[in-house]
Amino acid sequence: MKYFWPVNIFNYKTFGRRPSGKDLARIKQSPYYKKRGFIFMGTKPNVNIASELIKEYAKSSQEARSPKIKIPVTHHLKKSFDELPSEKFKVMWLGHAGFIIELAGKRILVDPVLGNRPSPTQAFGPAKRFHAAPISVKELPNIDYIIISHNHYDHLDYDFINAIKHRNITYLLPLGLGATLKYWGIKAKNIYEVNWHEQLQLDGLTFTAADAKHYSGRFLNDRNASFWNSWIIEGNNEKLFISGDSGYIDAYKNIGHQYGPFDLAAVAIGAYHRLWPENHKTPEEAWQAFKDLQAKKMLPVHWATFDLALHPWAEPIERLVKVAAKESDKIYTPKIGEWLDLKRKIKCNKWWK
Ligand SMILES: [Zn+2]
Ligand SMILES: [Zn+2]
C-alpha cells in the first residue's frame, strides 16, 4: 500500500514524540501534570475562538502586519566569534525569541530558530521570516548549552537541531521535552529536563527553571505533553532572566524576590491578542513583569521576525517604548545580530522606524 504522505514537504519527525517509560513516570510526579498533560494555568479559552479568529484575520491586512523597512541585520561568520567564549556577560539577539549568551567562558543558545517558517514545513504556510537570520547553521561557532523554553515551532526548530545533533552540546529543557530531542538524535546523557524551581549547577553556571503561563504542542495529539517555563541563568555575579512565552503572572514578583535582582531580563513582548490574553503578554504587561522581576535592564524579544498574531509588525516595541518612556534608559533595542554592550549607557536606537 502506498501511503499518502507528502514526504518532500513534511518530515514527520518534526512533530516530536510524547514522553513514555521512565520519562513519563518522572513527569507524572510533577504537581503540574494531570492525566495526559501539564495544566494550563489560565481560564479555559473561549470556545468560539476559531470562528472569532477567522473574522479577525478577515479584517486584518497582511500589509499592515509587515515591516515597511528593510530590517537591518548584522551577519556573522564562525571566524567573527572568539574561539573561547567570553568570561564576561555578552548577549546577541538573533531575532524573535532566540539569542546567544556568553558568560563565564561558556556559550549558550536560547530558543534558536533559523528556519524560514516557524511551522511543520518550510515549503509553505504563514509567518515567513521578515529578515535573514544573522547566522547560518554552517557558520555557528562552538556552543556549550542550548536552552529551550517550550516546544512551539517559533522556539524549537527541528531542522536546526537535526543539523547540529552530532555536536557535543548540553540541552536544558522543560519537563517532557527530552523524549522529542532523543527522538531527533540527541544523546540522553546530553539532556537535562528541569522542573520549575529546580536548579542545575554546571561549569560554574546555575540554571533554574521557573514559572510561565503558556501551553505546548507541535501536532494534534501532544497538547501540553511537555512543559513550558522561564529560565534564570547565573554566573560570574551576573544574573539573567528569560521569560519564554507566558501570559502575565503574579509569580514574577516571587521570582524577583527569590532570585532577583537581575542584571538583564529578556522578556517576550509580541504575539499578543485579545483572543489569547493568557498565553502572551502585551507590551504593557511585559513592562510590568520587568518591574516585578526587579531587573535592571530589559531586552525585549519575541517580535520583529515572524508574523504570529494580528498586530502591526513594530507595534510591540512602539507600545513598550511608550509605556516605559520615563525609563527608556532601561530598555535595550539592539539590531538583530548586534552584540549588546552591557556596560554602556543605553541610548534607545529606534532602528525599526
Ligand atoms: Zn509558544
Ligand atoms: Zn513564541
Image (cartoon, grey):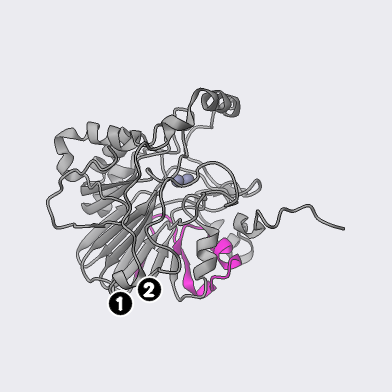
Residue 261 vs residue 310: left or right? left
Quadrant in which the N terminus is drawn: bottom right
Q: Is residue 251 above or below residue 172?
A: above
Which residue, given by chain and number where applicable, does mark 2 sit on?
Answer: 142
Q: Nearer the viewer, residue 219 or 197?
A: 219
Under mark 1, the amino acid is Glu
Under mark 2, the amino acid is Asn
- Give how far across and how far down residue 130 sits, in percent: 43, 45
Residue 164 vs residue 208: left or right? right
Residue at the limit of the structure toward the left, as seen here: 345
Q: Secondary structure at mark 2?
A: loop
Q: Which residues are magenta?
A: 172-201
Instruction: Name the residue rendered at 51%, 44% in the picture.
Output: 215
- Give how far across and how far down residue 69 sits, in percent: 34, 40
Q: Residue 149 sits in which quadrant?
A: bottom left
Residue 194 part of the magenta segment: yes
Instruction: Name the residue rendered at 65%, 54% in the picture.
Output: 10
Q: Is residue 158 above or below residue 38?
A: below
Q: Nearer the viewer, residue 191 or 74?
A: 74
